[in-house]
Amino acid sequence: MPAADRPTKYLVALLAGAGAAHFLAPRPFDTTVPPWLPGRARTYTQVSGVVELLLAAGVAVPATRRVSARAAAGFFVAVFPANVQMAYDWRHRPAPLKAAALARLPLQLPLLAWASKVSRTARRDGAAR
């Protein structure tokens, strides 16, 4: 596998794995949905899982890679409130769990940069490299 393809393949794997996890083990995701959002938490969990699976498929296909990677970057921004909610909810948990919840907050920045890099390196015409 050429080194240039690794960021793309790993992003596809991350998005597909996270999307599948939303259906295989939805409860932890349900608990991060901010309570001020209308509707059921499970609906948000399922919708975000579908979005991640669609983004993974889009990033995997050269013709849709650029726009899908940009959309993935936007998705990482959109789910940030769930990470904030988790950090808030876990503020009284044992130190290792609280640290893990807080560590998720700055993790969004490298995810955003990663998706942006994949978008920038995708060919404009969608042709495979």
Image (cartoon, grey):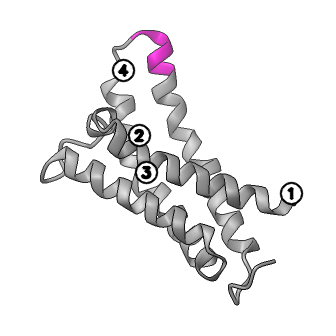
- Separation of marks 2 and 3 at Cα, in angstroms: 16 Å
Dot 1 corresponds to which residue?
3
Contact flag, marks 2 and 4 (Cβ < 8 Å): no
Give the prevailing secondary structure in the magenta stretch.
helix
Q: CA distance from mark 1 to mark 4?
A: 40 Å
| Tag of residue 71 | none
What residue occupies the far top of the structure in this picture? 94
The residue to which callout 4 is attached is 91
The circle on residue 19 is 3
User: Which residue is label 2 attached to?
Assistant: 83
When the figure is inspected, residue 96 is found, relative to residue 35, above or below; the finding is above
Q: For this view, does 14 lie left or right of residue 7?
A: left
Local packing at callout 4 (Cα closer than 10 Å; few below 14, some 14-19, many 20+) is some
> Residue 42 placed where, x, y %?
21, 46
- Image quadrant in which you'd find residue 86: top left
Q: Residue type at mark 4?
A: Arg
| Range covered by the magenta-colored residues | 94-99
Picture quadrant of residue 119: bottom right
Task: Give residue 57's position: percent from left, percent from top.
Answer: 53, 67
Residue at image point 20% right, 45% down: 41
- Whole-angstrom CA distance, mark 2 to mark 4, is 12 Å
Q: Residue at x 21, y 52 (%)?
A: 43
- Disc with the residue nearer the chain's start (3 vs 1): 1
Q: Is residue 79 visible?
A: yes
Q: Is residue 9 magenta?
A: no
Q: Residue at x 50, y 39 (%)?
A: 105
Q: Nearer the viewer, mark 1 or mark 2?
A: 1
Label 1 and label 2: CA atoms lie apart by 31 Å
Image quadrant holding the N terminus, namely bottom right
